[in-house]
Amino acid sequence: MIQTWRLDTVGQTLVLASHDSRMACVTYWGARLPDGEDLTALAEASVLDVTGGMLDANPDLSICPDARHTFPGQPGLVLHDQNGAQVLPDFRLSDAQQTDTALTLTYADPALGVRYTARFVVHAKTGILEAQSHLQCDHPMRLHWLAAPVMPAPQLADEMIDFTGRWIGEFQPNHTPWTAGIRLRDNRTGRTGHEHFPALILPCRGATNTGGEAYALHYGWSGGHRMIAEELSDGRRQVQFGHAGGTELAPATEFTSAKLYAVYSASGLNGCAVAFQRHLRDHVVQWPDPDRPRPVHYNCWEAIYFDHDLDALTAIADRAAALGAERFVLDDGWFGLRDDDTTSLGDWQIDRRKWPDGFTPLIDHIHGLGMRFGLWFEPEMVSMDSDLARAHPDWILGLPDQIEGRQQRVLDMARAEVRDYLFDAIAAILSAYDIDYIKWDHNRVLPTPDAAQARGFYALLDRLRAAFPKVEIESCSSGGGRIDFGVLERTHRVWLSDSNDAVERLRMQHEAALFLPLAVTGSHVGPRKCHTSGRMIDIRFRAWVAAQRHMGFEMDPRELTDEEGRVLTEVTTWWKANRDWMATADILRLDSADASVMAELQLARDGAQFVVFAGKATTGAQTVPRPLRLCGLDPAARYRIALVNRADAKGLSRGHQMIKSAALELSGQFLMSHGLTLPWDFPETMWVVKGDRL
Ligand code: DGJ
């Protein structure tokens, strides 16, 4: 007997089938099937042949492939009892619950006292499919591996794309060819990590940013993930995501995977990107006030580092406000005796040497300028030179002779008394002052990975959010070391990278847009001479790169010349005038024919306007730019196209191009088929083009 289930979004269908009550398999995931498709016939049609050298029937590649029935690939569950003996459940379907948007399948092995549940939820508006697995045992068991429901990977695909990165170099794509065997990512750092953004993109052959079929998956977990992409010798391909291997350290009776977010796209990588961007912004992030425009941000880190001084900070605040900043964040250095990064983490009391009257004078000044105030914390960390470490050495994770990171250690967040201490310390500051923003940092990896640490972190965040529901939180971890949908269920902005170098940022923002919308992606105008690369970067390029995302400033604004201040004010004013529609726009990555150009189009949700950011990172190979093909427009509509920053054209750009002096009116078809021919420019520049539908 075959039982089948189907879930649909506008452009996508997922079909599951269970043969004789065995664990369900995904028998179809792809373009939306016609209503009334015969799902039993579909399941029968997908059965593989058997030939020499094979078992007499092909073991199921199910949503939790089981090691019990000679499955030739990686199992979805590895479970041991408390004596170390392997537990191999013989799961049979015990319950199936379905609505239009959700399916819950429960499997049980009553003899072993183990139940497995897979839950799928589809979001019609965003096209995202969520899948999560849950295991319940009658007796405590040791879990070595529990995959979120396992998805098949397309066979007409030659490569897969996952991500690596490093400090000041986040979101670097890896392109790996599909071959027989496994591609394994197992993150041992205990946090999401710069090195391991938990996602996989599966472009079908020929897919680009703007066309073709693609699949994408993201595992929403901040404790480090494991990903297995495997091709079996019969050609079948499976993708498994779960918590990093062996990070469930204690025996337990319940285990849950994080949510796996998945999507199929018939419009290239952009189809996946738009689904993730919308889903994150409109469903995952819990905005305290969804209608409030994203405020222009100021962060003082690269201006003053640990050197806190009220007079300097008020002068900086004056200048930042005049440039257009609306929120002022006081970074590291305000607590304990924190004059450098060797001391005081854990002592979350205001340093009275630097702040004799507390924060009131600074906050009053900032509020007087019409800005809001935010504060930096790094709650999970402790310096050995701190009152906290001296009082509670037993609260510190790891061995005494561990290697420290940034001269600091990690608190054991699984302990309720640690969370209570941190809650009380942070709540005391939030209650004493008018603070509506926290920058929450995490500057080292764990001594050993442990899923309980991420759960403890989530529990503390949840408790603080419940107590201070109006406070927005930024997830930072030496820049982009903790970016994932799990943390973003509890926070509102990510610090993509400690690199404020606009050249590096241009690339990182381009890649991160595969998952992150403007609304959550912080981007700051850094100092003229970049602190992490030594590059001298023109203010125009720095400002426009920041204006691509949630804009902010991080330099000491007192270094700005009048001309730089004028340019920055102008770009900030443009950003403020456009931020409302840009906050909900789709970021579409353009396929640039010109290797020196990295470009995107931000398309308003109603299609009435768009902006193109065409960033030129290096000099071009040919003498003048190649046309840049746009996407996402209505071919039949006409658009008014204007260069926003046409004044930036250089003297060496000598041609008589109409776009340099006036707006053009062109059809969507022309713009998408031929493309926009932009003026010549220096490297490290950005053309900004506004389009309005006529
Ligand atoms: C690392 C962060 O990424 C920086 O922005 C800054 O907050 C420092 N930590 C402070 O120590």
Image: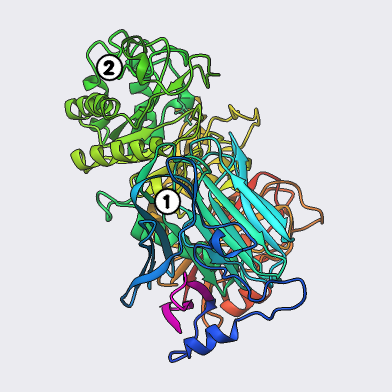
Along the line of sight, the residue nearer the viewer: 154 or 427: 154
User: Taking 382 as reference, is 99 left or right?
Assistant: left
Q: Earlier in the sequence, mark 2 or mark 1?
A: 2
* Magenta region, main secondary structure: strand
Along the line of sight, the residue nearer the viewer: 480 or 436: 480
Amino acid type at circle 1 is Phe
Residue at image position (66%, 64%) is: 591
Q: Is residue 165 above or below residue 266?
A: above
For the residue with label 1, is its CB less than 8 Å from the closest atom of ligand 1?
A: no
Confirm whether the magenta stretch covers residue 508: no
Q: Quadrant of residue 161?
A: bottom right
Depth check, mark 2 against mark 1: the one in front is 1
Please name the residue that numbered disc 1 is placed on.
485
Q: How many marks?
A: 2
Please name the residue that numbered disc 2 is placed on.
349
User: Taking 613 as reference, is 383 left or right?
Assistant: left
Q: Position of residue 395 (x, y in %)?
A: 35, 20
Extent of the magenta region: 1-27
Q: Position of residue 103 (x, y in %)?
A: 36, 71
Could you classify mark 1 by the number of other residues whose Cα lies within 10 Å: few (under 14), some (14-19), or many (20 or more)?
many
The image's mark for residue 588 is: none
Residue at image position (43%, 92%) is: 36
Residue 324 visible from this viewpoint: no
Q: Position of residue 107 (x, y in %)?
A: 39, 66
Amino acid type at circle 2 is Gln
Q: Position of residue 472 (x, y in %)?
A: 30, 42
Helix, strand or loop at label 1? It is helix
